[in-house]
Amino acid sequence: MNAKALNESIVAILEKKQELRALDYNDPRYDDIEEELHDLEDDFNEEYGDELEDVLEDVHRKIKSDADVLLPTAYLASSLDGKELEDGDDNEGVWVESDSFPGVEMRLVLVANPPRVLLILSDQERVLWTAE
């Protein structure tokens, strides 16, 4: 997997998400920007889906989670700056349960710079995979 190209694709999606979030639903550009975001996400899943699903399966195994592996775009953070992660935003990534951490709420999040999968546990994060 080309880590540089993967990172560029993640950055493009996160920038488009930020652009969309900055618009009001009534903005005439909203639908066009939303469509561009969906196109970027579709292209991302087509280009990196199989490889990232393998990575995500390994991550799920590593934390002993039997949750279904979703499309890679479901795991994407919502911004480049990680502010939502720092603020404990519940909408980041995918909620998972783990036999390694019974009763603990956690999320898996795919972030950029470098591309990596984070395990977010209430007040901490752990890197479970980094693209090379």
Image (cartoon, rainbow, N blue to C red):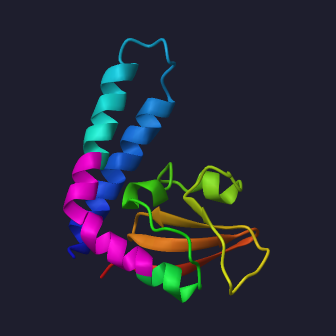
118 lies above or below 93 = below
Question: Where residue 73 appears, x then y in whole percent?
Answer: 39, 55
Q: Is residue 127 left or right of residue 13?
A: right
Magenta stretch contains residue 9: no
Residue 117: % across, % down = 47, 72
Q: Residue drawn 50% across and 55% down?
A: 77
Residue 32 percent coordinates (x, y): 30, 23
Residue 1 vertical position relative to residue 68 in the rendered view, above or below: below
Q: Residue furthest right?
A: 103
Query: What main secondary structure does the magenta stretch of the protein show?
Result: helix
Residue 37 visible in the picture: yes
Q: Quadrant of residue 57?
A: bottom left
Residue 46 part of the magenta segment: yes
Image coordinates for residue 83, horizontal then vertical, percent: 61, 52
In-front residue for pair 17/53: 53
Q: Quadrant of the C terminus?
A: bottom left
Q: Residue at x 68, y 51 (%)?
A: 89
The segment highlighted magenta reads: 42-57
Q: Is residue 70 above or below residue 101?
A: above
| Total marks in image | 0
**Residue at horizontal 54%, vertical 58%?**
93
The quarter of the rendered structure image containing the N terminus is: bottom left
Residue 76 visible within the image: no
Quarter where residue 113 is shown: bottom left
